[in-house]
Image: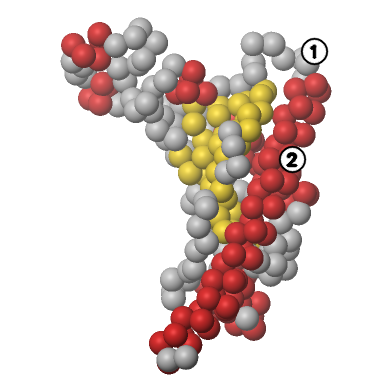
């Protein structure tokens, strides 16, 4: 075997095998996360059955292997698992942790993104409406994780390797995402942004807003 083929074989048996294991672990965890979301939505819907207006929806939807969503009142929270495995840049603080220094392969992670949209954006097919990435979960081959949130990393990367992405962790992240989204209000856009409209916009369906709609980041997202 030539030297180049040896290098290829080494990468296939080492790095590629690690990435495959990371994917498998993240995929399994995402399946458990979907179960947790379903459980949460069912329980909270039953708990609030006689308390809130029944027009206020609390509904879970499984949208395939790599996506799930939960509608809570006027908010749509979407969880998506990326199908690729990622490595961190050289200046990322993950490289300063003893956990990764002991085994650099622990730094390879799958990613689960959490987005917040307005439910009406989907209901009325407002394709130009914006959603926001409010957090992302990194999971490695050992099932260890850390979380990045908007404006505040509430689970410092220094804790990577000390916690497993188990059901209690999933529920904590999910409930915090819901709480954050419900408290994250829709702001009126500046007058100048909606000063003009064109004929095409008024010729579309009535329910399609001529004004791009999306929340604005107003406070921090924390898993504390």
Q: Residues within 10 Å of mark 1 (few under 14, many from 20)?
A: few
Picture coordinates of residue 143, whole percent (x, y) = 70, 62
Determine the residue located farthest toward the front in the rendered image: 1
Q: Nearer the viewer, residue 182 or 47?
A: 47
Total numbered labels placed on residues in the image? 2
Q: Which residue corresponds to the image point at 31% horizontal and 20% vertical from the top-left?
A: 211
In the rendered image, the vertical position of residue 187 relative to residue 106, given as above or below = above
Q: Residue at horizontal 19%, vertical 18%?
A: 196
Q: Quadrant of residue 54?
A: top right
What residue is drawn where x is 60% and y is 71%? 18
Q: Nearer the viewer, mark 2 or mark 1?
A: 2
Q: Position of residue 88 (x, y in %)?
A: 48, 69
Q: Residue at x 49, y 18 (%)?
A: 123
Which residue is labeled 1 in the image? Answer: 50
196 left or right of 95 in image? left
Q: Secondary structure at mark 2?
A: helix
Q: Is residue 33 visible?
A: yes
Percent coordinates x, y for residue 47 in the rendering: 81, 23
Nearest to N terminus: mark 2 or mark 1: 2
Work out whether residue 149 can be spotted: no
Q: Which mark is residue 36?
A: 2
Residue 210 in the image: x percent, y percent?
30, 17
Q: Is residue 33 left or right of residue 181?
A: right
How has the structure been colored for display?
Answer: secondary structure
The image's mark for residue 42 is none
Q: Residues within 10 Å of mark 2 (few under 14, many from 20)?
A: some
């Amino acid at each position: 075997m030539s030297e180049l083929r040896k290098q290829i074989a080494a990468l296939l048996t080492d790095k590629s095998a690690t990435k495959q294991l990371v994917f498998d672990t993240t995929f399994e965890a995402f399946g458990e996360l979907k179960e947790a979301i379903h459980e949460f939505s069912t329980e909270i819907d039953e708990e609030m059955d006689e308390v809130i207006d029944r027009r206020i929806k609390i509904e879970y939807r499984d949208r395939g292997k790599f996506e799930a969503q939960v509608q809570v009142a006027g908010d749509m929270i979407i969880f998506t698992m990326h199908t690729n495995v990622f490595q961190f840049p050289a200046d990322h603080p993950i490289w300063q942790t003893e956990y990764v220094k002991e085994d650099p392969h622990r730094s390879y992670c799958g990613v689960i993104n959490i987005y917040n949209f307005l439910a009406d954006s989907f209901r009325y097919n407002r394709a130009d409406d914006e959603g926001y990435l409010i957090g992302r979960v990194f999971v490695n081959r050992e099932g260890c994780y850390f979380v990045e949130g908007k404006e505040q990393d509430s689970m410092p990367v220094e804790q990577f390797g000390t916690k497993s992405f188990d059901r209690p962790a999933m529920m904590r992240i999910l409930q915090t995402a819901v709480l954050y989204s419900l408290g994250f209000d829709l702001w009126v856009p500046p007058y100048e942004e909606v000063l003009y409209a064109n004929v095409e916009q008024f010729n579309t369906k009535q329910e399609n807003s001529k004004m791009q709609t999306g929340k604005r980041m107003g406070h921090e997202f924390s898993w504390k």
